[in-house]
Image (cartoon, rainbow, N blue to C red):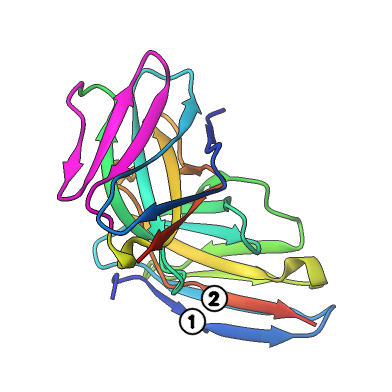
Amino acid sequence: AQTVTQSQPEMSVQEAETVTLSCTYDTSESDYYLFWYKQPPSRQMILVIRQEAYKQQNATENRFSVNFQKAAKSFSLKISDSQLGDAAMYFCASLENAGNMLTFGGGTRLMVKP
Amino acid sequence: DSGVTQTPKHLITATGQRVTLRCSPRSGDLSVYWYQQSLDQGLQFLIQYYNGEERAKGNILERFSAQQFPDLHSELNLSSLELGDSALYFCASSRDRGNYGYTFGSGTRLTVV
């Protein structure tokens, strides 16, 4: 069974600075997908970024990028030029191609200081 | 608007009661997933349906059941409710296996008193 671990319950960053959220996962599959979801105070789950395990190139979406280390089973999220609107819970998740459900980590609460 | 519609948004009910949560998936999505999020916790997978058939089951209690109808909407039934069932219940949908991620509804906040 796949597991996802986020070791940082809370993180804070100064506005306009860069922050990195950590995530490790465990899977026995070679074909899988990794995701970061954002959950703002509204509680809506919003997909931030996606990574395909068979692609070595790290995914990037505007100010959001990942550092995907397949051998280490690590998938961190980097947020550049942090904005007040980035304050939220961030969840790392994995999906095995042979599996049927997205498995989430416990989340990291990100606070952005003005 | 994500395209996934969940009703009701809020529900307050007493212990021992039964409630039904409803979900309409995004247009074109055949898979529906139900997740439970207790206060400040991660999301726990409950159950998945694909085109009307149960596809996968997580740690769903026997008091809980779900189904997906021919029009692809889904309902999650929670019975003999306990205080510990208070949580945010999310429905999500995807095309095929969800390799491009799931689209989530805004959730139903259930409070059992």
Residue at the location (36% across, 67% down)? B25
Q: Nearer the viewer, mark 1 or mark 2?
A: 2
Q: Position of residue B26 (x, y in %)?
A: 30, 67
Residue B112 on the magenta span: no
User: Contact, CB < 8 Å: mark 1 with mark 2?
Assistant: yes
Quadrant of the image for the C terminus of chain B?
Answer: bottom right
Task: Please rate how many residues cluster around mark 2, counting C-alpha atoms within 10 Å: few if below 14, some from 14 to 19, many from 20.
Answer: many
Residue indicated by mark 1: B7
CA gap between label 1 and label 2 equals 7 Å
Residue stretch in magenta: A56-82
Q: In the orientation shown, which residue stands out farthest toward the top? A: A71
Left or right: residue B93 versus residue B59 is left
Q: Position of residue A38 (x, y in %)?
A: 38, 57
Which tag, 1 or 2, sits closer to the chain's start? 1
Answer with the quarter of the image where residue B32 lies: bottom left
Tell me if residue A80 can be seen. Answer: yes
Amino acid carrying mark 1 in the image: Thr
Amino acid carrying mark 2 in the image: Thr
Q: Chain of mark 1?
A: B
Residue indicated by mark 2: B108
Tell me if residue B100 can be seen. Answer: no
Viewer-nearest residue: A39 or B3 = A39
Viewer-nearest residue: A79 or A27 = A79
The secondary structure type at the circle numbered 2 is: strand
- Marks 1, 2 in one chain: yes
Q: Position of residue A95 (x, y in %)?
A: 41, 36
Left or right: residue B40 versus residue A4 is right
Residue at the location (53% across, 42% down)? A105
Quadrant of the image for the N terminus of chain B?
Answer: bottom left
Viewer-nearest residue: B18 or A107 = A107
Answer with the quarter of the image where residue A86 lies: bottom left
Answer above or below: position of A112 versus A67: below
